Amino acid sequence: MLLVCDIGNTNTVFGAYEGRRLVDHWRVSTERKRTSEEWALLIVELMRMSGLASETVGSAALASVVPPLTPVVTRAIERIARTAPLVIGPGVKTGMPILYENPKEVGADRIVNAVAGYERHHQALIIVDLGTATTLDCISERGEYLGGAIAPGIAISMDALFHHAAKLPRVDFAQPHNVIARNTVESIQAGIFYGYSALVDGLVERMRDEMQVPVRVIATGGLAPLVAKVSRTIQEVDDLLTLDGLRILFERNAAAS
């Protein structure tokens, strides 16, 4: 069994694959104070909860945007898989040319998403990841990573509003009844919910103009289904895109070794 792990700033997602089939997946908070032993115990318990034996894990792949946690979770996975995971980064075979000025600056999750999206569709893509940061990544029709845009994530924006505007309450991210809201809670929700969908649509439209080819738009991340409900440009939602990308990259590197 292949264990994959996507370490994000807010959440960490694990998945277990049998061949190309995702058997199950689990989302937990990214707790930076956990030790490698605690991470290992957590993975074992999550698998057991799904009726899976951790002893069946024979290989692993990991992507991380939290550098201090990478070696900690790597050690945890080594305890379970009894082998080092493939850590996505420089030197890993991706099969995708990276046209960024400095390829090392591109987050591992962005490359993993790009690989998964292009493997599935083999056409020009824009991938919108609605996570801690909101990222939009462009892939050419030839399968090249072109670059993209980064904006503050939805949760970050809501927290900033709560902490820096003394009279405004903390609210849930939810679709209000109207854009023209008649109370403070729904006014904030209207600004964030419809504002972020407009941000995504505006950036996608500008990127399409620059790319000048037909483009498919895929959204991923925990909040993607909500934003996609009102977006004019998102055509597909896959909140497990990163896990599938990790599986693909593991297979490519295993074949090349």
Image (cartoon, rainbow, N blue to C red):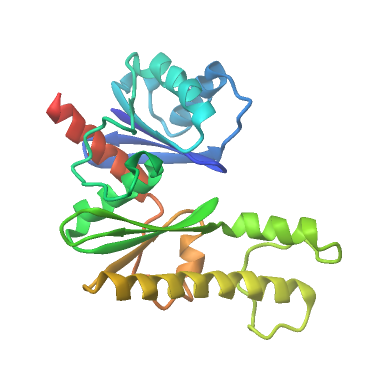
Q: Please tell me whether residue 210 is drawn above or below residue 5 in the rendered image.
A: below
77 with respect to 116 (left or right): right
Q: Please tell me whether residue 57 is drawn above or below residue 28 in the rendered image.
A: above
Front-most of 139 and 154?
A: 139
For this orientation, the residue located farthest to the right is 167
2 with respect to 195 (left or right): left
State the residue at coordinates (43%, 22%). 74
Residue 199 horizontal/vertical position (percent): 51, 71
Residue 219 horizontal/vertical position (percent): 39, 61
182 with respect to 206 (left or right): right
Residue 178 horizontal/vertical position (percent): 64, 84
Front-most of 19 and 216?
A: 216
State the residue at coordinates (46%, 69%). 200
State the residue at coordinates (30%, 71%). 210
Quadrant containing the C terminus is: top left
Quadrant containing the N terminus is: top left
